[in-house]
Amino acid sequence: MKASILKFVIKRIALGLLTLFIVSLLIFAVTQAFPADPAEAMLGREATPEALAALRADFGLDKPIVVQYTNWLFGILRGDLGTSYATSISVSEYIGPRVSASFFLLLIAAVGSIPLSIVIGANAALRRDRKFDTASSLVSLILAAMPEFVVGTILTIIFSTTIWQLLPAVTYLEVGAPPWSDISGLILPVLTLLIAVTPYVSRVMRAAMIEVLESDYVEMARLKGMDERTVLWRHAMPNAVGPAFQVIALNLAYLAGGVIIVERLFNFPGIGSALADAVRSRDLPVIQFLALIIAGVYVLTNLLADIGTVLVTPRLRTRLK
Amino acid sequence: MDQQEIETSGLSRRHFIQGVSSAALAAGIFSSTSLNALAASVPGKKGGTLKVGVVGGSNDVFDANWIVAKADQARLMSTYETLMTFNEKFEAVTVNGLAESAKQNSPTKVTVKLRKGVKFHDGTPLTADDVIATFNRLLDPKQKTTGKPLRVFLDSSGLVKLDPLTVEFNLKAPNVDFLSVLASYTYAIAKAGYDGKTQIGTSAFSLVSYTPGRESVHKRFSGYWDAKNVYLDEVRIIDFSDKTALINALIAKQIDVAIDIPFEQYKTLKAKKYLNVVENSAGAWLAFCMRIDIKPFDDNNVRQALRLLVDRKQMLNRVLSGHGKIGNDLYGYIDANFNANGYQQRKQDIPAALALLKKSGYSKANPLRVELTAPDDTGGLVLMIQTLADQAKKTGGVVIIDAKVIDGGTYWSSKGQYMNTGFYTTYWSGRTYLAQVAASMDIYPETKFPPANSSFRADYLAAAGTANAKKRRAIVARMQKEEFDKGGYIIPFFNNFADAYSSKIKGVVVRPSQLNMDYYGHGFKYISLA
């Protein structure tokens, strides 16, 4: 059975890599369709034909498109991400610290939201139609209806600017310092992300748990006289968590892109502002790399969710041959 | 969020070419209160780190001779110095400049003598060679600099070293106001051999580190020529991708200065005891451009009708919460010869506009339908086109303006809407009348004015070479008449800009100036922390 899971994982990884390759092709094609090329976008109204030609030669834009793409692709395969047009520094040096900062933010949001939403969802299901369920449903519906920037703005008004001045309004990381060096500056962005993700996942968890609790095998377990805790943790939970994994994966993948708004709000030095700037200046090497990173998070989280679902769901596990 | 932001200066993500080039300014333009406030407060103690927040990103530029945004200005001013600077009347002076003396010998000859003992941050002395190298870089069309306007007057061969500290500028076209050109802040002096990458200037603070899109750190330079006026140990210029975050950081006391606050926040910030707010007006303007060679704007009736369509006051209120001065389709606000003919303020006059349009055959059945564009990176321009489209509805369907917001990267590119379409928007920093004519006529021919049969160009050359103020004014009046009657710009207002900073900061000079915080304290040298 282990071998069959390994085969499944390898197949999924291969599919993921293929997805990334197609994404890179698409992004490259889209950037070619931009009305202005990077040299024109950067020079703007200061452009002289001489300066345009010099920049294009610098960036290698005078080469045929196919050559430009294959140069970039082989560079990536060799671990050379190229040089950012706008900042003239290597993409890895420029984007590296931002990727790790964003990942860190994402990681804390994930680590915080997964157990939180499972506990809330499961409890709401167990106390179905009682006070906790009604209250948590209402709150999560309200929170789910609010976009991140509204949540973030309200939190800022409450905790840093207008009502109390308890927490920093923006994250200020010294250059070269790790993201956890400004813990107090991380509280509001993490809280905003938690509020963005938790309601969805806890809703799904609640629904899945209710379904499972009404199923024949839970009924059977109860009739066998098992104590309620065993029924809940051994029989109900694994089957309910499966569907929740999928939602968690989708939410985390969404966060990889949605974190942009939160980063902007808290001036967090992550990939969000870098991507927005790169699109504006047509900084192709940066756009390409960040698009791959975000697509990579999608692929990876979905892969992990699928593996997780298979592992916790007995009927799926046994179906793998 | 961009669209709600008001671009206080109109100069957000793009080139506002080197600034005011000016001979004189009617002192009455600025309110007496701001001039009274000129006296700087008593300096505080030595030492400390100043945190300056400014909207910026990874596309920022760090260069002695090129900028695209406010963050770039702040960094340029922190690192480099110009030969001349402007006083509050926008006259070129040597205070805070690298020139000890400068003289315009004739309309085509200027001599500049450098201060003795000025050192670059690497310890090497400033010489005439560095000045000549800087201007050669500005004159080189292959370099990314703001030197384009300079090339009208100067060739490389005109730069002559008289001795190690003296440079002569021999102009190829007369310009009696060349000292002001030398005060343009992007004509800052870098070391000979400067490639735009290693930032070594002569300012009070030398660069320690620069991380694009995040921050630059500058520490006090012990070899500075004017060290007695330097108080801080360190300056940090921090990028904010969003104005809301910038203001929040200031309110939460995480930064000491917020450059360019949105005017909707003006009252809120002013009400806070621990903050000061300072507003400045220096003749910067936002405008609609009509290309006089593209249909239907080649018809002067159409151009004049559109000028009569604008409710300028409403537009100023909507775009800048009223923080500006209403415009009359004439530029050069800081010039002594601004509105030399004393024209009355143009007001919205729908019947007159409709009468002009009728002459050209436009009616409800045959409406004037035009597309008007603005870039999404300059909030003020977006609000302007939306407001004009609204105001056009008062014609009852005779004028239909289709307002379109275009991605900034496309809009400003050399193939974009900017300068290539009939009806679009632009912005400029304040400059004197003739300097603006040079820029708008040849360097950025936004409206393609003047038409071929006009004497405007000959008048311009005559005025630039005329030292006699009275004669010059007469020529300028003739030029302004032609622009007022037939020009391609609609200039609804001149925009102010404002900064907010912690009240523990001392030494901020409040006076009319072209850049925020009075030229960023000329590299933050007068500023101290209490």
Image: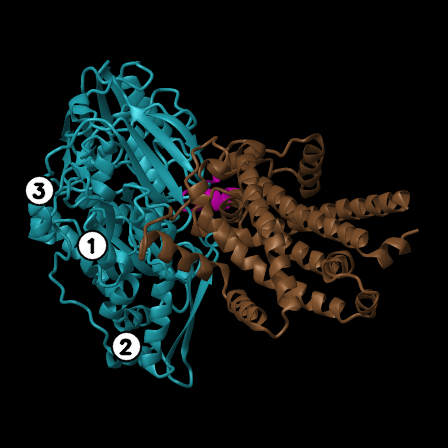
Chain colours: A brown, B cyan
Q: Are marks 2 and 1 on the same chain?
A: yes
Instruction: From the viewer's perspective, tell me whether residue A4 is left or right of residue B257.
Output: right
Q: Is residue A284 above or below residue B114?
A: below
**Could you tell me which chain the residue with mark 1 belongs to?**
B
Circle 2 residues within 10 Å: few <14, some 14–19, many ≥20: many
| x and y, in percent, of residue B387 in the image | 34, 69
Q: CA distance from mark 3 to mark 1?
A: 45 Å
Q: Are marks 3 and 2 on the same chain?
A: yes
Q: Secondary structure at mark 1?
A: helix
Residue B270: give its label: 1
Residue in the picture at 34% in, 64% down? B384
Looking at this view, name the residue that lies furthest to the right: A321
Q: Secondary structure at mark 3?
A: loop
Residue, disc 3: B468
Q: Is residue B194 visible?
A: yes
Instruction: From the viewer's perspective, tell me whether residue A278 is left or right of residue B47.
Output: right
Q: Are marks 3 and 1 in contact (CB under 8 Å)?
A: no
Q: CA distance from mark 3 to mark 2?
A: 39 Å
Residue, disc 2: B353
Magenta range: A39-49
Reply yes or no: does residue A210 show up in magenta.
no
Reply yes or no: does residue A48 show up in magenta.
yes
| x and y, in percent, of residue A248 in the image | 66, 56
Q: Nearer the viewer, mark 3 or mark 2?
A: 2
Is most of the magenta stretch helix, strand or loop?
helix
Q: Label 3 is placed on what type of residue?
A: Asn
